[in-house]
Amino acid sequence: MRHTFILSLLIALLPHCKTAAQTIEPQDIKSILVEKHDPSWYRMQQQAWHKEILSNPRNERAWRNCYEATRYWEKMIKAVESDGLNMQEIHPNSDSLMTLMQKAIPGTYTFHLCYGRHYADRPEAKQHMEEAIRLMPENPGMDYDILISYLWLSGQYDRLPDMCRRCSEETSYPLKVLEYNYNQLVTLERNAVIICDGDIELIPKLLLQHGLDIRTDVEVVPAAFLWHEKRFERICKRLNIAKWQESDSTILREIDQNIASKLAHLVDELRKDNRTLYMSCSAPPLFAPKGKTLCSEGLVWSCKDEPYDNIARTFQNVELHYELGYLRKPNLGGDDVWYAGELLHYNTILLLAPLVQKYIERGMRDKAENLYYLLKKGSTLLQLDEKHFRNLEGELQKNKP
């Protein structure tokens, strides 16, 4: 009876598939950090895996892939809601899938992991994530990212070293990802705090810190926490600084003013203990700390009260601290190519290219040429679309010695 009930619900939620969708081969949905597709691909995969569930409602692999495809598709098309698309009218949506998954495969690793992740802000999420850890397979692959994030977000820092070591031993992060995050970490001042941009900068740093004991004095904070009030409060507690308090309704309501105020709060509070706040340069600084100066030091922005010779500091980072040899190494098949890793490779070249002219301005032409040809070689090995390649070509040409 239960099998029949689940099957009838699935049929009711089955989207109207086009002929092409009926013949598409289901593929395992990789993390968007590894492989990114357009929204239509995820929609077709959602439908393909949905058909697999219809044929076997106990198939954990099918449930997981259907959920991941749905999740990514929803994220990519969410921006068109304003054009009249109601996410709740799309079937199956991720919420409806979680309801069905709970009926079809309760008590499984797949269900507990997906539920704990999907409803991360619910009180019961912790129980589901703990069950997922208890039921964790021998090598969960990219699921380590989810489990490490959970331990970090829930403040279970004492459990991080073991999970990070297991991840380091059983999985393989691309050299480009690890080197980029290493280069950011090693140049920071003692006991610094760095605001990072997403999982591609959070997880590798935690792996380097807790798995390889590199710069464990640095605190890493995801940028998303700055807008989330309860999580930002938790960060302040973690950093042992005063809570952020604000009564201005405009600052509380407007995201840019809100985050600028919080960043300024972090700078002021950290300065009391001679600590520095940094922001990742993976993207332009959309939110500058209110009343503070942002200075580029290569791959990070330093938040200071007063200007200083940040160019000299960047020279020092490039010459003494950064590991940049990987930029000239082609992928020979021994290292995975991740979409996000290629973006970090792209960012490194884009951020360091202006330094070529800075070397020339200060009379160091040999160093300018060495850096230029390293970045030029790195640009030829980039595995992204033509648009990214043209952007790099333009930036390198502009700064050519």
Image: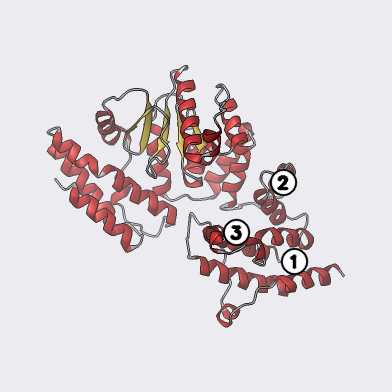
> How busy is the neighbourhood of tag 2: few (under 14 within 10 Å), some, or many (20 plus)?
few
Query: Image height check: is 149 above or below 114?
Result: above
Residue at image point 44% right, 20% down: 271
Give amino acid for label 3. Arg
Question: Upstream in the sequence, badge 3 or badge 1?
Answer: 1
Of the two numbered discs 2 and 3 in the rendering, the one whose residue sits closer to the viewer: 3
Give amino acid for label 2. Arg
Residue at image point 28% right, 24% down: 308
Residue occupying the far right of the picture: 1
Residue at image point 69% right, 58% down: 95
Instruction: Where is residue 99? Give x, y as percent.
Output: 75, 59
Left or right of residue 158, residue 331 in this image: left
Of the two numbered discs 3 and 1 in the rendering, the one whose residue sits closer to the viewer: 3
Query: Image height check: is 200 above or below 70?
Result: above
Left or right of residue 318, residue 102 in this image: right
Give the residue pinned by disc 2: 134
Give the residue pinned by disc 3: 71
Helix, strand or loop at mark 3: helix
Left or right of residue 307, residue 63 in this image: right
Of the two numbered discs 1 and 2 in the rendering, the one whose residue sits closer to the viewer: 1
Residue occupying the far top of the picture: 272
Asked if disc 2 and disc 3 are in contact, CB closer than 8 Å, the reply is no
Helix, strand or loop at mark 1: loop
Give the residue pinned by disc 1: 58
Between 157 and 252, the residue placed more toward the observer is 252
Give amino acid for label 1. Arg
Residue occupying the far bottom of the picture: 19
Instruction: Where is residue 50? Give x, y as percent.
Output: 66, 70
> How busy is the neighbourhood of tag 1: few (under 14 within 10 Å), some, or many (20 plus)?
some
Question: Upstream in the sequence, badge 2 or badge 3?
Answer: 3
What's the CA distance linking mark 1 and mark 2?
20 Å
Q: Quick check: can you spot residue 184?
A: yes
